Image (cartoon, rainbow, N blue to C red):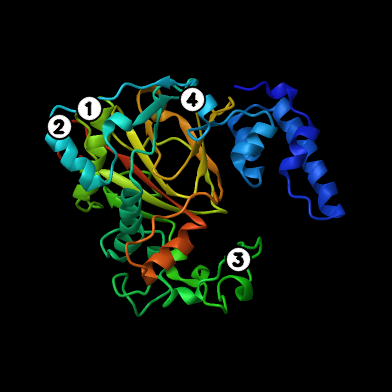
Amino acid sequence: MADFTAASPRVFQPILEQKSMADFTAASAESSLLAKTINEDKTFKAAFKFFKSLKGDVAVASQKANVDIIDAADCALWDQLKSVELSHGDDPEEGSSLLEEFGLVPVEEWEAKEIPSCPGGIILRSPFTRRGERSWIEKSLWDYPGREDLPSNLDRHWEWTEQSRSSLKWWPASSTFVSDALPERPKKRRKHDWKADKNKSLAAAPIWKLRWITLGYHHDWDSKLYSEDKKTPFPDDVNRLCRFLARRLGYREFSAEAAIVNYYHLDSTLSPHQDVSEPYQEAPLISISFGQPAVFLIGADKADWPSAVILRSGDVFVMTGPSRLAFHGVPKVFADPKWQLLPAREKTERDALLTAYLAHSRINLNVRQVLPPGQTCLPRLD
């Protein structure tokens, strides 16, 4: 980890937006405060605040600030990390067929590294083909939202009273209504510049308001518990994909039983937390990212500065062993102009809509095992 005591206000100045003299003065004050914060406060909270404040290319901004961040695109740092040995499987034919079905490159080409300061935290550099990425993105954005049986953040505040999820028009009627630059979410929301977008941009479509969907055992956000009463069949393809990934890392008994599909935008964050709701916590937690990159923080103790990782489209982060119960969060989702969705073989309206959405968004598939091996259901809560 970099020496944070060497940070100075001058170091942070280039990474802050300065559009006028007033902005310059405010930015200078903010950079001074930020540098002082890092000098005096090396906690998870301070790291979260620091990375959330970065502008533009986060990898470049972190480097200028002399703050370490792990990025598979940065070969110099990536190559220094300890490699994780991967199992190629027992049945080559089964492996080959699954690779094609799931849109994965050959296992021989996979690269997995362990976070030095967080044992058991494993980064798997994108094992997906570009066509595979597109397939899982389409499933997350086109299939899951219309499923009546899958809980989402919209269920409690359903605005479209005369329509069901399956009949709702989640997307704008035409990509010609999609503006190139979506409006920034204002601090104080005003109808004319967000909720009732006169241009009928993507920001006004129901899909833009979707934040999460749960699969399998549905996490109760109030009680923080799972139950047999809130459960739907777990998607077979997601289960088999995650079992395949887990087995390559040596977890042969892994079974995907609960998942949260998170939909982030460039102004989204995820506060530091632990995933402790699952009764069985010996199995790994598998996190798959698609779309725009994000800064992922992970650490064993909130009193310490965490490890920072850039997760790009297709990257898989696996929390195993000691890292399974580590604190983690996402302070920043940022745009990477170099990343683009693989175009469809034939140009379609869907292609244009997906491209517009993903220019501002990230999808994260977070998969867990709930039950111990051999157990078929949770005990009833009476």
Which of discs 4 and 1 lies nearer the camera? The answer is 1
Q: Which label was assigned to residue 88?
A: 1
Say if mark 1 contacts mark 2, CB within 8 Å.
yes
Q: In screen coordinates, is 53 left or right of 109?
A: right
Which image quadrant for residue 355?
A: bottom left
Q: Image point 12% across, 36% down: which residue?
A: 93
Q: CA distance from mark 2 to mark 4?
A: 38 Å
Q: In screen coordinates, is 120 left or right of 268?
A: left
Can the viewer see residue 30 in this picture? yes
Q: Which residue is mark 2?
A: 92
Can the viewer see residue 219 in this picture? no
Amino acid at circle 2 = Pro
Q: Residues within 10 Å of mark 4 (few under 14, many from 20)?
A: many
> Measured from the top left, where is residue 211 in percent x and y?
44, 57
> Measured from the top left, where is residue 122 in percent x and y?
39, 28
Q: Which label was assigned to residue 300?
A: 4
Amino acid at circle 3 = Pro
Of the two numbered discs 2 and 3 on the same chain, state the one appearing first in sequence: 2
Question: SS for tag 1?
Answer: loop
Say if mark 2 contacts mark 4, CB within 8 Å.
no
Q: Which residue is mark 3?
A: 183
In the depicted structure, whether residue 264 falls above or below residue 66: below
In the depicted structure, whether residue 368 falls above or below residue 265: above
Q: CA distance from mark 1 to mark 3?
A: 46 Å
